[in-house]
Amino acid sequence: MSSFYLTTPIYYVNAKPHLGHAYTTITADAMTRFAALMGDDAMFITGTDEHGDKIVQAAEKAGEAPKAFTDRISAEFAALWPKLETEPSRFVRTSSEKHKEVVRTFLQKVYDAGDIYFGEYGGHYCFGCERFYTEKELESGLCPQHLVKPEYISEKNYFFRMSKYQARLKQHILDNPDFIRPERYRNEALAMLDSGALDDLCISRPKTRLTWGIELPFDPDYVCYVWFDALLSYFTAIGGPDSPEFPERWSGGRHLIAKDILKPHAIFWPIMMMSAGIPLYKNLNVHGYWLVRDAKMSKSLGNVVSPLDMAERYGIDAFRHFLLREMHFGGDASFSEEALIGRVNADLANDLGNLFSRVLSMTAKFCGGTVPTPSEDTDVETTLKALARDAMLNYQSLFANARFSNALESLWELVRALNRYVDTAAPWALAKNGDTARLGTVLYTLLELMRKIAVHLWPVMPRKSVLMLEQLGIEFSSKTTRLADEADSFGALAPGGKVAESSNLFPRIEPLEEAPAKPTEAAVEAKPAPAKGPAPEPVAQIEFADFQKLDLRIGRVMACEQHPNADKLLKVMVDLGEASPRQILAGMAAYFTPQDMVGKMVTVVSNLAPRKMRGLESQGMILAVHTDSGLELLTPGGPAAPGAKVS
RNA sequence: CGCGGGGUGGAGCAGCUUGGUAGCUCGUCGGGCUCAUAACCCGAAGGCCAGAGGUUCAAAUCCUCUCCCCGCAACCA
């Protein structure tokens, strides 16, 4: 029995769980269940990441101590997973004592290997850019953006020698095509390694700046950088590298992540393991993003509906099926209630659910609700069984390669074939003609293949799978079920067994009311603009005196052009009734062309401190409002002179 | 030349590694069946596979160039 040990990222607790977290965890759960059915010793873990600046800030904002804050949010995450029918074997927290010990031991090991050194951080700091520049990035000693001499700042820190292992990692990726998948992310990782020498990773933060972290074993004045800390949680969950269970468990180690954290997992993490002399993970599975459709498209109430509500509304199994079927693993996909309903109706209600309904009903009607004994196969059955075998083998191999959508598509070829078989074999006609031998064959073939489908679906829809099998009179156990055996065998369903007399696995869902796909301008105007979207965040009240600090003025746009060195910025010259026009940079290039702007009356925050952006100075801010269709300038409703004060 | 992804019937996508009848789901139209959750089955319409060159007996698939979208990074005061 080989080990299958999968991790989700440990989720950062500065925000509540959302669709992305749900997708990752559900996928991890499905992969793990699949591995179990393939005979592996399978488990997956998840957890929460609780260190770093942002956590401290979020805690402060919530008026709590970091510890209390992280305890609370972490518990929220932990409580969520059972609701999604996911069963993480363990839940790691980076604030646990065990984890701290694992991190310290690991750091010491890497330190002893000579891969950590104490050095100066940064160097040339440009205040305009708020970042450090390396020597080679500077243009004749000046910041390339602002053309000023950056200041030399130093902070002593510990560094991890990543470049030392760069070539080895590259070779490993080249030698192992499945190490990072899908391939697009493997290419991206290779590109990261090809774009020059890796910078050594700064793995410490001085305690003078940050105390909420794990202290370095070799220097009590520093805490560990969050990524270094977080990645090691994958070891903590199985007791750390020195635990007895580790070698076996880790031999099947693999990770599931979203594309935004590719670099730490594809580059930092393997190099950390190389340094510590630990074998690398088997593979890294990278998925894309769910794009959530604009709230205005949904029903009358118009609120953005939480995907977790979706699970409750349409059923967790349907939700899981949708997520795995709709997204081609690796790419982005869009989430919408309409799409979810469409999938549930088409795949689950019409195809799969209806298949169970019609076949069980016929079994009840024509065979007294017991599994009939099959007799001779005809060519039809032979062909059908060959198709079934292909479908199952394809499903298994695609699923094993994280191509869940294609896998389900493949299995559905069998579902549809069975519906077709019902039509062509026409059991009702056989029953009418008293051809019980043939009837027995047809119904038995159907029931047995339905059993196989149900078993294959357990990783995706655990509850419904068990229910389907129950309806077929079978008690399911993941311990004894082996998918690999299913493709090449036939007849496990025992004739004479009782089956359910009817079935309504996936009731059809009424489609949402038609929302105008693209409301015309007139339609938009006609709408009384009801409260839409999520409730606005409550904003702290301010005193009138605070408001008076703002100097709002009406201005006229004299000229406008694209910022020469920035995609999103327009350089707008605004007449505020002053001696010369103000130069203001506005992030509106995506919404307005320079020609659109010229001549417009705009509202300007005129006493905002100047700020340089991509080399040009902005001397104010042009106010605008986000609308359904984009962005609208805030402009006076009647004549107003440039420079007029807004109050 | 910052990095990367993508452009395939009305919509959403697969196919491209390993060239050879362009496929799936939804939608539309016509028909069939009656076991079933107004479901299921059959058939039809609809695509010069972004564009241009090239390699080849043969290109959606390989090579080159161009155009257009979308992420990420830098700036959204």
Image: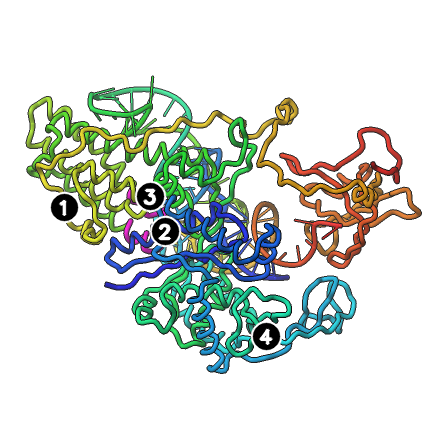
* CA gap, disc 4 and disc 1: 67 Å
Q: Which residue is mark 4?
A: A221
* Label 2 with label 4: CB-CB less than 8 Å: no
Q: Nearer the viewer, residue B54 or A362?
A: A362
**Which quadrant does the N terminus of chain A fall into?**
bottom left
Residues behind callouts 3 and 1 on a single chain:
yes
**Which quadrant does the C terminus of chain A fall into?**
top right
Q: Which residue is mark 2?
A: A403
Q: Which residue is mark 1?
A: A490
> What number is the disc on residue A409?
3
* CA gap, disc 3 and disc 1: 22 Å
Q: Secondary structure at mark 2?
A: loop
Query: What is the chain letter for disc 1?
Result: A
* CA gap, disc 3 and disc 2: 10 Å
Dominant secondary structure, magenta: helix
* Residue A469 appears left or right of A374: right
